Amino acid sequence: MSDSHDRTPAVPEEPIANPGLPAHQWRPTDVDPRAEKRAERQVAALFGLSMLCAVLFVVAYFTLEIGDNFDTFMNMGASTVALGLTLGGALLLIGVGIIQWARKLMGDQEIVEMRHPAGSSEEDRAGALEALAMGGNESGLGRRPLVRNTLLGAVGFMGLPAIVLLRDLGQTNAQIANAEKGAGLQHTIWKKGMRVVRDVVGTPIRASDLEIGDLVNAAPEALFPTEENGYPEIEGVELQVQKAKGAIILVKMEPGDITPVKGRENWSVNGIICYSKICTHVGCPISLYERTTHHVLCPCHQSTFDLAHGAKVVFGPAHRPLPQLPLAVDEEGYLIAVSDFTEPIGASYWEREKQ
């Protein structure tokens, strides 16, 4: 006798009946070889135009200067417009080309796949590989070398804008070694004897002007040239770069609260200590100060630095202390820099040693 519990329900071997789907409509490129060839040339032309846009991006990058106003569009300089249009065009043309390839040349036959247990059998795995191979064949990569090669060329040419844009990350150590003071992140406009002035207004700061608990946003005097100080005029992009790199914060605390880093015992003046305003995480400006703990907070990602202990990191994603600017006073009692920063300012990067 057979146990009724041993019976297993029959599994249908065929899919359900056609629910009434319309008959498959063949595309012109499926039945007309001339239409197929024409579509192939159209897709290849789109990829070719993408390559041209990538080349034009590189040309525009090196021939049009930032701030070049010989031609403007919606109050934007020629460099901005040209770089945006060429890079956007290169990406857009690749996308449009792939869409046209899928619509006109790739196979569009409906495929039915029967449901199967979660644990696939060897036959199912072989079938999956066969389906992948069939998909590759339907895409036409092997049969359409013109489309394949122009697509690969278009994607490859997109590396050109990426390569030239890496140039804006900064100078190499070799370039910096041969450059004038102020190049790259290794140096700023600060130099020996330069007065510390209030940011925005540019007035010099006497050590006696500050009280315990004060935090002052300050800048190099060279960014505010006058006939009296004799510094040359700086304009445009260079001015913005030097402002960003030279920005500092001054904090006054009880001298006894300061625990100086070894070798920096005389870098502060009567409890006045100076650090870069640029966070060492990703370069955000900081100035949120808590006077009782001497902690300063970066508003972007909450990195917290202890200004009384060499601006070491006490919380957050930053890995390095804020660079410190050595201070002194001149004959008139104004705060001055003893030298430039002795380490790179700004966000951390791969060639900077951890302190």
Image (cartoon, rainbow, N blue to C red):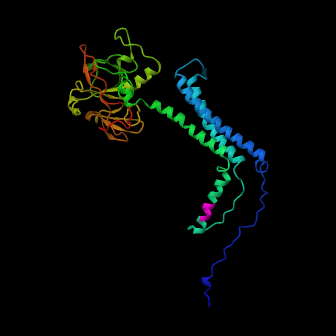
Pick the front one: 257 or 56: 56
Residue 148 is situated, as x and y percent measured from the top left of the image, at: 63, 45
Residue positioned 43% across, 24% down in the render: 241
Horizontal side of 93 relative to 25 (left or right) equals: left
Horizontal side of 94 relative to 37 (left or right) equals: left
Does residue 26 lie above or below 47 as drawn?
below
Does residue 304 lie above or below 144 as drawn?
above
Residue positioned 25% across, 13% down in the render: 332
Quadrant for the N terminus, please.
bottom right
Residue 178 is situated, as x and y percent measured from the top left of the image, at: 36, 24
Q: Is residue 343 located in the magenta-colored stretch of the structure?
A: no
Does residue 263 lie above or below 13 as drawn?
above
Pick the front one: 262 or 30: 30
**What stretch of residues is rendered in magenta?**
126-130
Residue positioned 25% across, 16% down in the render: 330
Residue 232 is situated, as x and y percent measured from the top left of the image, at: 39, 13
